Image: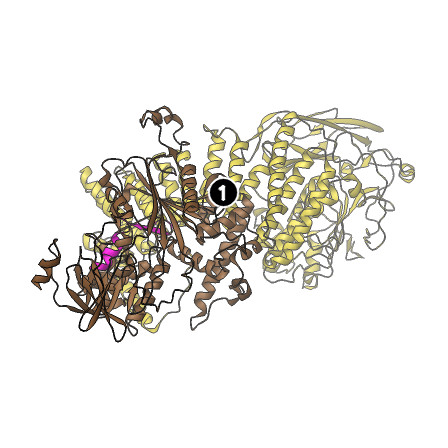
Chain colours: A brown, B yellow
Amino acid sequence: MAEAGAGSAPDDYPSIDPTSFDVLICGTGLPESVLAAACAAAGKTVLHVDPNPFYGSLYSSLPLPSLSTFLSPDPSTPPSPASTSDDSHAVVGLDRRSIYSEVETSGDPPEPSRRYTVDLVGPRVLYCADEAVDILLRSGGSHHVEFKSVEGGSLLYWEGNLYPVPDSRQAIFKDATLKVTEKNVLFRFFKLVQAHIAAASTAGDVAGEGDASAKIPEEDLDLPFIEYLKKQQLSPKMRAVVLYAIAMANYDQDGIDSCEKLLTTREGIQTIALYSSSIGRFANAEGAFIYPMYGHGELPQAFCRCAAVKGALYVLRMPVAAALMDEEKKNFIGARLASGQDIMCRQLILDPSYKIPTLDVPCDGSDSDLPRKIARGICIISKSVKLDSSNVLVVFPPKSLEEQQVAAIRVLQLSSNLAVCPPGMFMAYLSTPCADGSTGKQCIKKAIDVLFSPQASDGSEGHSETTSESSDDVKPTLIWSCVYVQEITQGTSGSLLSCPVPDENLDYRNILESTKKLFADICPNEEFLPKKSAPVHADDDSDSAE
Amino acid sequence: MHGRPRRPAKPEDDEASAAKAAKLRDLQAQVLHNHHSRTYTKEALGLSFNLLEINPEAYTAWNYRKLAFQHNLRELSDPEAIKSAVDDELRVVEVALRQNPKSYGAWYHRKWLLNQKLAPVDFKREFGLLDKLLKVDARNFHGWNYRRFLARFLGVPDEEELKYTMDKISDNFSNYSAWHNRSILLSNLLMQQSKGFESKQKILSEEFELVIQALFTDPSDQSGWFYHLWLLAQTSTPEKPQLIASWPSNGVKLSSSFVREKVEQNTLSSIWCYSLQERIVPIVLYFDEPVKGLNPSSVKLKSDLVFAKDIHWRPLSVTDSGYSNCWTTQLEIANECNGLHQFSVEVIIPCSDDIVSRSGSHYNFPVDFSFSIELIGCGDTAEDIDLFRDPISWDCSEPFHPHGIYNSISFDQLKISSELVQEDSTWHLERLSDEIELFRELPDENSKFVKLTLARLLRACAAIKSRGRSLAERKGYCEEALGLLNDLIHLDPSHKRYYEDERSLVLMDQLTCNMETFMKHCSVKVQPNSAPMNHVQLCRLSLTRIGFAERLLWVQVLDLSHNSLRSVEGLEACQQLVCLNVSNNQISSFTALESLTKIKSLKVLDLSFNEIGAHSIDTTRYICSSPFSHKVEACEAFEECQQKNINVEDYWEAILFFKSANLAQLDIKGNAVANKENFRTLVMTLIPNLKWLDGECVH
């Protein structure tokens, strides 16, 4: 074993003992980490390795100086060992790939640049009442991560201006930009939805107190959500509020034929239900959304810690070089680490930066024929887009910027109270799904232009001094930005699992859904992170949000 | 707390509550014992604390603590010791409030303590306590009361408190207490003309804007509607009181006699006035809002007549507030005269500081009008008038012949026009019209608040239109309001009676606001052996109450039969009324007729087929603003009745009514009370001059 370690690795890879595990996971992204925690909680032995010296993989938060190397990795990676055949198994070399492309940076990163932490999954938040929060509480992961609320609420870009998103009774009341008739129609719609949710939730009870008449009729639930909103007489602006800023639809819902993903009323109402149950779930959280302090990279780490508590073994800076395959059964039985050590396992899980060997066909990706992409942007700005607010979500509905904009663009502004940047500075994340990278990037840039003003050419601060009198109206100055395109691939199951990449959504719901499916494949008879797996003091809800 | 369902008690709760009751009884007995023996030791006080901790409603325990505190205070001289004694007591209150935040006794005790001013008040702590309390229940009116108390105590400016109400409304606009406090603070600020609050119009417009955001967001929430009603009242009440009607009106000629030929030829130029036979001229002044302060110096009379006694103005109102819309005086003519003489009377109301409205505004619209009186000397022969030789007949089934106009009937002769009034009215009208437009847009079809508010807005508009001279527009408003009120009667049957009353007012307004419509209900009644009298017939209109009495001041014969009247309040203004028919209505007690006792000229009253005596419990006592009270002057009448073996306890209402009614003809058949024992005797005893009772001649 010592030979193996010394022979092939100049980095002094440690050797691992034992050499056989139930589950071997490579990559510490959120799905991998959740799987590690869930498998460990289910009593499996887990070896969790990551080629990087940090946790999180594609879900990590990086110090700003490390971003460019992560997005555009050095192509001179050592070639994977050639496929060879051993006595009992074949060695299949594993290649890595980058899912990022068209990286474009502008401006100089402000100093000290190490004090800026950038998310790879941004813009992203958690609903106070969503499954991610539940899993964190159940697993005890909530003890390793702290949240703050997106207290500035949401803004909607509409006809050239930013408007607050009226998402509650009080917000509708206070909103000075709405016409009174709009207020009436919108709140009536909210009440209708609330009554439906209440009726639907009590319907399952034995008592059946729920007023069944309060439910929205089935035929309406199957309607496209936009048709239902029209039926409720919501104005185009109110429809945009509900569809893109509350129900968080990605694609244009107006053109029924061209639309890639048309939300049904049922789905729309599901998200609204989540949204409204999120408001007020934690007494100290304002609004529906929370964000993890120090960035999203904290989340996979929290789950890794849970896994470690349950006995999972962790090794960082340890790439997997090859997979080991049983030649007779044509399934994977282990992996060869970069150290040269062979680890046997019943289940091999890889993060999506590994190319899945082509001989392994059984993947159930149904729409894999259409590669989807996301254009993402990261900006550093010196002022908040909304006066007196630190953390704000901005939504650009489809076509609000230009005709070619087929999907909504979401922007999440974060402040120093989340410890992601120095005081007085703000981070802004943008994303939009797209079929073609350059169109997507163009939309992101357009949104950046609308929200921020470019830095004065001489780069001096004097510019902002002269306009300080009307500084309330002046747009925040863009100091640094990075725009890039990310591919979306599906997670695949089989004897070699590949986890999903960060998707185009604002939350983790879909990613966790796929992760749960993967877990069900690995441990068909086990409960996913059952409550009892949490440490004793997990009943303390209040500390999960600041 | 609000919106929490009650859960039925479980058996184990019963046990616990029994144990608690036993403990409470024990504690209570001990505290009472200490109270009686005036034991104010530490242990004894501790017991009272234990009691209040469980039951803050034990008022005696609070009182005991108060006495003990005062007793023990005498032994303290060190200010520090006093302060700590006060602090201890404050803490007791806080503990009690934790048990019940709505305990009257606890709040009272705290206010009492602070009012002693024994130690400097820690306002930070007090306001901190309040903030905590109102966070738990923002609608706890005790908390709001206490906040007002503290603000006054500390002298917090109203502006700051106003901001606080805004904060609370921003948190949650379903907060009656916050809206209510806002209305109080704004009233003060507007009254004091504080900085930034000089323009009532500007402030009210902003408030309308604010509350409308709440109303449109959630029309089913009531708190905003109540605030809107308050704003509406502020907008629709006149800024300054004005005289809107009088009797006699300008240019009228009154006479004590008449010439029959002239009646037949319809060329009568004077109005026969019943009370002139007794040489009395009543003057009635009707204002658009309740005022007080009418006296011989604020209302000047110029006349070539000589009046006996001092002129005394009295309010015509069933309440004793001193304020009234309607004021009257009875002029007693003392002139000796022979032959036909004509005299003139001029009434002058200058700007006056004496005449004040409830809101403190002074009378600011000088008015000057005159009328004339034709007198015939005592010895001179005139037409023989015996009004009651035959019973007056009411027959409203007979087709009504509206009589040709007679120039002396007029209700719009007072020339009240002022630039100032116009300007105010324009703003009011614009404001109200904006509101009407807005609520018509509110798509909540079946909201009773929308309909009611619209109806009230329309009525307020109509009222403003009467101040100008565009009475025709008024009809449109009335029409729409009537439709809304009819809808409401069906939509919200539990408040049916209120809507019916409102509808009656609108109906009365609609019928009387314009000459043309009103004249269809007016005629001159000519009885054999009697003078022609101004007759108004308002039958079969489903009226439930009287409104717009200012337009009926000149009526002498009034037929209100076949309506649904439950009270005749308002008719007291009709000092000329001689004959009144309220048969076939829903009057259920004599209390509901109290107004009539103020009309000295009323001689003929038809009460038949009402519900007097049919209901054992007199509900009108709670509806009428001032039920009869047992007054000393009634003693005589009671004694008189007792002598005739009349059960005074059963008939006190009837006795009080009939003793001040000087009727010649009464119809009361068809009422339960008429069939009761001794009732006839009672009537005969109390009205010695009665000639006709239920159609029979009794004298």
Q: Position of residue B15 (x, y in %)?
A: 30, 71
Name the residue: 22% across, 44% down.
B85
Q: Is residue B633 left or right of residue B523?
A: left
A19 and A187: which is toward the camera: A19
A330 and B596: which is toward the camera: A330
The kind of residue on which mark 1 rests is: Glu
Please say whether residue B537 is one of the residues in the magenta stretch.
Answer: no
Please say whether residue A304 is one of the residues in the magenta stretch.
Answer: yes
Q: Is residue B164 left or right of residue A144?
A: right
Which type of secondary structure does the marked residue at label 1 adopt? loop
Q: Position of residue A506 (x, y in %)?
A: 38, 52
Q: Is residue B557 left or right of residue A359?
A: right
Q: Which residues are magenta?
A: A285-305
- Image quadrant of residue B146? top left
Name the residue beneath numbered marker 1.
A402
User: B151 above or below B48?
Assistant: above
Which chain is mark 1 on? A
A142 and B202: which is toward the camera: A142
Name the residue: 40% across, 28% down.
A470
- Name the image quarter holding the N terminus of chain B: bottom left
B40 and A465: which is toward the camera: A465
User: A13 above or below B119?
Assistant: below
- Image quadrant of residue B22? bottom left
Circle 1: is it few (<14), some (14-19), or many (20+) Cα within 10 Å?
A: few
Name the residue: 48% across, 51% down.
A242
Any part of residue B347 in sight: no
